[in-house]
Amino acid sequence: MQLAVNIAVLAAIYALISCGYVLIYRVSRVLSLAHGELMMLGAYGLAATASLFSGHPLVAIGASVVLAFAVGIAVYAALMWRMTGESVLAAVLATIALGILLRGAMVLVFGTQTQYPLQNLGWTNASIALGSSARISAAGLALVVATATVYGGLFLFLRATRWGIRMRAAGQNPLLAAQRGIRLHAIYALAWGLATLTGGMAGMLIACDAGIESTLVTIGLKAFPAALVGGLDSLLGALIGSLIVASAEVLLIHFVDPLLSDVVPFFVLLAMLAVRPWGLFGTREELDRV
Amino acid sequence: MSEPRASGYFRTTYARDAALLDTRAQKIWLAILCVVLATLPFVAGPFLLDLANQVLLTSIGAIALMLLTGYAGQISLGHAGLLAAGAFTTGILVKEFGAPFWVTFPASAATGAAIGLVFGLPSLRLRGLYLAVSTLALHFMVIHAGQEYETRRGFSTGVVIDSPLQDPRAWYFVLLAVAVATILFSLNLLRSKTGRAWRAIHAREAVAEALGIDVRRAKLSAFVVSCAMTSIAGCLFAYYRGFVSAEAFSLFVTIQYVATVIVGGIGSILGALLGTVFVVLFPYGIEALMHTLGLAERLSSVVFAINYAAFGLAMILFLIFEPQGLVGIWRRVQAWFLLWPFKQRRLGR
């Protein structure tokens, strides 16, 4: 029972992070390897707003979410728009460089000590009993709820709203979309904003559970296999991929060796790449093949 | 990208076209370079000598990556893993069997080649992004295997190796010899059939295949050669530091190697060398800058963070403003002098 709860929480973490990879990839065909760092930046944003608006936790959370969105837009406006139309490699390398830049800058601004934004908010991370044999932390529960909400919201947004449909159009065929008067730069910026927002939320919630540490970046990177297993251009795939990767990881750690935790997602990734490189739900043409 | 030449320069035979050194000026400059390199260890202090050794050591891996990424067009984000593979092969052989240098060196190369074959297999089916990701996954696996060895055998902080060479001056000549051998090997390979096949698959795989090039073979050979060379660099690294630890081969090391290719300029051995010098000297440059600004005392605890931030910024600036890298700048400077007093201006700007 406890194992199932652990899997659910880890899957929620991976799903919340990997939908950022999927959003950016689906819309602009760019893989953002700075996602882990942007996630961490979101967590630091929460820590900062929590001490700024001390006493008003809801205001602080709202402000940090808006901040994360703005950071995503800023990243696109400052850097990534120059990479539109460049080779895939150049864009990926730009995100790697951005990641290093952010990692250094965050240490400079926020220091190296582990921070606990939950304390700044004035809340405690209670442990809630589920049935007789399992427990879940309040932050863990919040993670599962947030993931469900985000995915529900994204599905609605992409299916039913005008901007969501524009976004899908831009992802399917940028040239046609541009000719129909869709502003590609605005769409790409929105994708970056949303991706950073969801990633930042994941960062904040993990930080509430375990504090902000440098391992957050590794978690961000480990969520990438989840996105790829499901198919890089499918949100549903990201959800299911997260479940697969999370269960593989939790079960192997529990039954085989705790040291495996960092490599299991990549094992799953390699297996998937060997068998079905476009992922479970990805489009086959997506793959850049001869 | 061709090198700019003075007017009146014509190549009239194929032999001349393939020659490594063809103008007198090149020969003269090479002779001067040889003299400088030979006298350097007797003039330089221990600090400069260590820097030179680091440049030479890094250049081997950088050239290897340049062959793979710059010429054959295959992306690899697993180069730190390969260095680790070479270093750990050496460490394990020395620690477990007391193997001498002449055993560990070929063993590392063989490990590298074997891993290269494994790294290369996904490239037969995958391209671009997916290939980069699979090499990234392999990086994590090699590092994990290294960590596993460390914990199993109780070397939790790393494996200590007794180096047969202690004198930095002797090290300089060994590293110089290996680096020069690497450069000559690569240049020779690039003007051979294999090298031309690599460039062809870089440009367009379908066309290369239509021209009768065995694409699978070319890709795999690129991976095997590059990985074996990097692994040798890892072996030398292990001896040079006298110490092997999985922590030394983080993802940042991979990024540094990729940066040598980007900053140096894709598709040029000279670029790999320039990029290496840039990447190795960069942190020292930052430190020197902080000293002159008088900030070194105050910021001493966050030096690594400043390094990271500045390094990322430098990479971004190169990607945006100088995609051809240092070698592009160098060629423009050359062209400027050759054309002087005239100027070359691109039309349509």
Image (spheres, coloured by chain):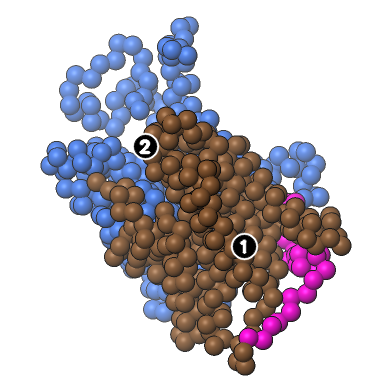
Residue A45 position in % (x across, y down) = 72, 55
Viewer can see residue B270: no
- Chain drawn blue in the picture: B
Residue lying furthest bottom = A132
Left or right? Give the position of A77 relative to A108: left
**Residue A123 included in the magenta stretch of the image:** yes
The answer to whether residue A229 is above or below residue B35 is below
Task: Judge depth for marks 2 and 1 and give the one in front.
Answer: 1
Say which residue label 2 marks. B267
Q: Residue furthest left?
A: B212
Query: Which residues are the magenta region?
Result: A107-130
Q: Which residue is mark 1?
A: A202
State the residue lying farthest toward the front. Answer: A160
Tell me the chain of label 2: B
Q: CA distance from mark 2 to mark 1?
A: 40 Å
- Magenta span includes A176: no
Do labels 2 and 1 touch, CB within 8 Å?
no
Q: Amino acid at mark 2?
A: Gly
Query: Closer to the camera, A91 or B251?
Result: A91
Picture layout, residue B240 above or below residue A128: above
Residue B214 shown left or right of residue A239 in the figure:
left
Q: Residue at x 53, y 40 (%)?
A: A187
The N terminus of chain A - image quarter = bottom right
Q: Secondary structure at mark 1?
A: helix
| Shown colour of chain A | brown
